[in-house]
Image (cartoon, rainbow, N blue to C red):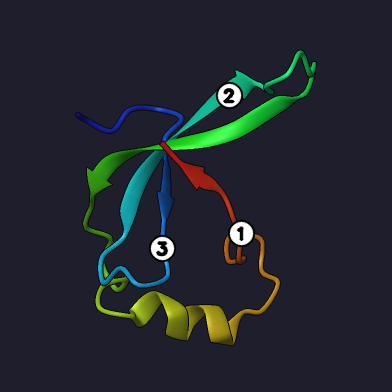
Amino acid sequence: MRARKGDWVYILLGCIVPVVLRRRMRSGGGGSQELEELFESVGECYVDGYLIGEAFAALDKQPGGEYYRYREFVLV
């Protein structure tokens, strides 16, 4: 699978390289009208300066920054 416009690069806890994820939405179960946000793994990627834990060092330097934040989500 190849990355495309709209995909996001994420640094996942426990991964030593950044990954590209694609956002997916699906309706909630049980007749719920709420949409559930899911992500599909596109694959690993290279981002200069963000390998082998370097991203977490940057995160510590810029807490609450626009591009750096902790988030929980579901991978499918």
Indicate whether 35 appears above or below 54. above
Residue type marked 3: Ile
SS of the residue under disc 2: strand
Task: Tell me the CA gap for discs 2 and 3.
Answer: 21 Å
Q: Position of residue 66 (x, y in %)?
A: 66, 61
Residue type marked 2: Met
**Which part of the image, by quadrant, shows the N terminus?**
top left
Left or right of residue 3, residue 75 in this image: right
State the image quarter where residue 67 is shown. Answer: bottom right
State the image quarter where residue 60 is shown. Answer: bottom right
2 or 1: tag closer to the N-terminus: 2
Q: Position of residue 17 (x, y in %)?
A: 26, 65
Tell me which residue sits at (34%, 80%) in the image.
54
Task: Tell me the CA gap for discs 3 and 1.
Answer: 10 Å
Tell me which residue sits at (60%, 66%) in the image.
70
**Which part of the image, by quadrant, shows the C terminus?**
top left
Q: Position of residue 56 (x, y in %)?
A: 45, 80
Indicate whether 38 appears above or below 24. below
Circles 2 and 1 in contact, beta carbons < 8 Å? no
Left or right of residue 8, residue 1 in this image: left
Please state which of residues 71 and 64 is positioned toward the viewer in this rendering.
71
3 or 1: tag closer to the N-terminus: 3
Residue type marked 1: Arg
User: Tag 1: Cα neighbours inside 10 Å, few (<14), some, or many (≥20)?
Assistant: few
Please state which of residues 20 and 37 is positioned toward the viewer in this rendering.
37
Residue placed under numbered mark 3 in the picture:
11
Please state which of residues 54 and 73 is positioned toward the viewer in this rendering.
73
Q: Residue furthest right?
A: 33
Determine which of the numbered discs, if any, sits on residue 25 in the image.
2
Residue placed under numbered mark 1 in the picture:
71
